Image: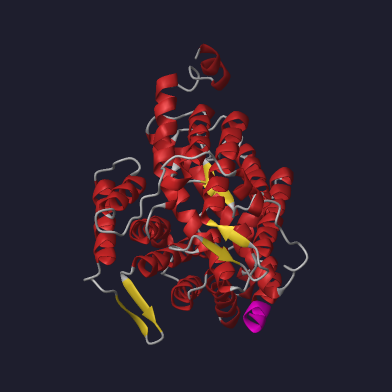
Amino acid sequence: MGKIAELFGFEKHGTSFKVELMAGLTTFMAMAYVLATQPGAIVGFGSPSVTDAAGLVVTQEAVVVTVALVSGIITILMGLYSNMPFALSTGMGSNFLLGAMIQAGTLTFSQAMGIILVEGVIFLVLSIFGIRDLIVRMIPKNIKIAISSAIGFFIAYLGFKNSGLGAYTASGIGMGDFTDPAVILSVVGLLIIAVLTAYKVKGAILIGIIVTTILGIPLGITTVPASLVSLPNFSAIGSISFKFDLLHIWTPTGFILIFVTFFGDFFSTLGTVLGLGGKAGMLDEDGNLPGIEKPFLIDAIGTCVGALFGCTTITTYVESSAGVEAGGRTGFTAVVTGVLFLISMFLAPLFLMIPNAATGPALIFVGFLMIQGFKDIDFSDFTEAFGPFVMIMFCIFMGSIAAGIAGGILAHIFIKVCTGRAKEINIGMYILAIPLILYFIYS
């Protein structure tokens, strides 16, 4: 313990081994829901596997074990290299975007991993050369805020759809069947998460998933496997590892997907790292985080490594704030979280038994957490608010994150040009508009 304290500088940061240990456990509890939602996002909720357009079979087991492995390794690396209490895993957003396209047959799994790999390499190059500020200046503030909110609305939409709370048919959107035990259980699950959150219980989402899953056993909604613990199926990991296609992604759709995943990862990481740094008292007098290039570099490396092993964008999780609030101030918090992710590889059957009635409410709540930035959109200037409005509406009513973000950016540029304020748009945005227009033409 003394060597660990010296390595991570416990005394300098005003913390202790016990505090950091509990903080790491708290962070894991807050973000372990990813192990329940990621398989469904890629494969389809309620489906054990999906066969993509190229014939590759991707199983939920392969996804959950791979996510646990990559999240554990990259989070430990974050703790050791940056000495900051930040944990990483597959981010909400790109997983649902690419997963929906894989399930629909419009994108192969290998193409999806190729897109993530390219996005990760771009992020890595920008991190190495410190071009972060250039990107930040290029995208208008309202658009950056709206991207996260739009993805949040989309994830909530999926939660309503998968849980059965909403009925989505050719005739439109309606109310689900509230006499169905699975729908009733979904309502109970949502209320459990809400109440726990109101009481500021750590890991409210994960606890809600667990309780709802248990309640589903006597109702016949949850199917209990023969064993809750098993050795990691490394052959399953191999089935989706190094399956990236870099030859067939250079299309209008491919470009917009690279853009969406990159900017989602970039701004999510920027906002999360600065926000967590503020909570932990790490920011300087100018509001900057000393050594911010370190978590950015690990985040970028994580995305590249994740793509190689079959994971969507690996990003720094805002749920790390749970550990920070519990007193975590050093990288040992992240190391503990990472070790717990590695241990969870042995619990794959436990995560795979979770029904839609439990993951649906979790998705709705994750969506709620992501749309909170909506309040920061400037509605006082119509030319600033129109783009975000289009972005969010397109995401919800077209059921497409890519269409929403592309439409929102084009609407922002259009309204600025038509009102004589074209000079307010960065030249990079005009260049970006070309592939966005092609996306709508060829999709």
Residue drawn 28% across the image and 64% down it: 182
In this rendering, is residue 29 above or below 163?
A: above
Residue 346 x/y as whole percent? 49, 39
In this rendering, is residue 26 above or below 431?
A: above
As drawn, the residue found furthest toward the bottom would be: 171
Can residue 67 be seen from the camera position used here?
yes
Name the residue nearer the viewer: 34 or 432.
34
Residue drawn 55% across the image and 47% down it: 67
20 vs 269, left or right, is left
Name the residue nearer the viewer: 218 or 15.
218
> Is residue 442 inside the magenta stretch?
yes
Residue 222 x/y as whole percent? 33, 55
Residue 130 x/y as whole percent? 70, 45
Residue 395 x/y as whole percent? 48, 72
120 vs 218, left or right, is right
As drawn, the residue found furthest toward the top would be: 2
Residue drawn 48% across the image and 45% down it: 348
The residue stretch that appears in magenta: 437-443
Name the residue nearer the viewer: 65 or 280.
65
Name the residue nearer the viewer: 28 or 273.
28
Can residue 283 be seen from the camera position used here?
no
Q: Main secondary structure of the magenta part?
A: helix
Residue drawn 47% across the image and 29% down it: 329
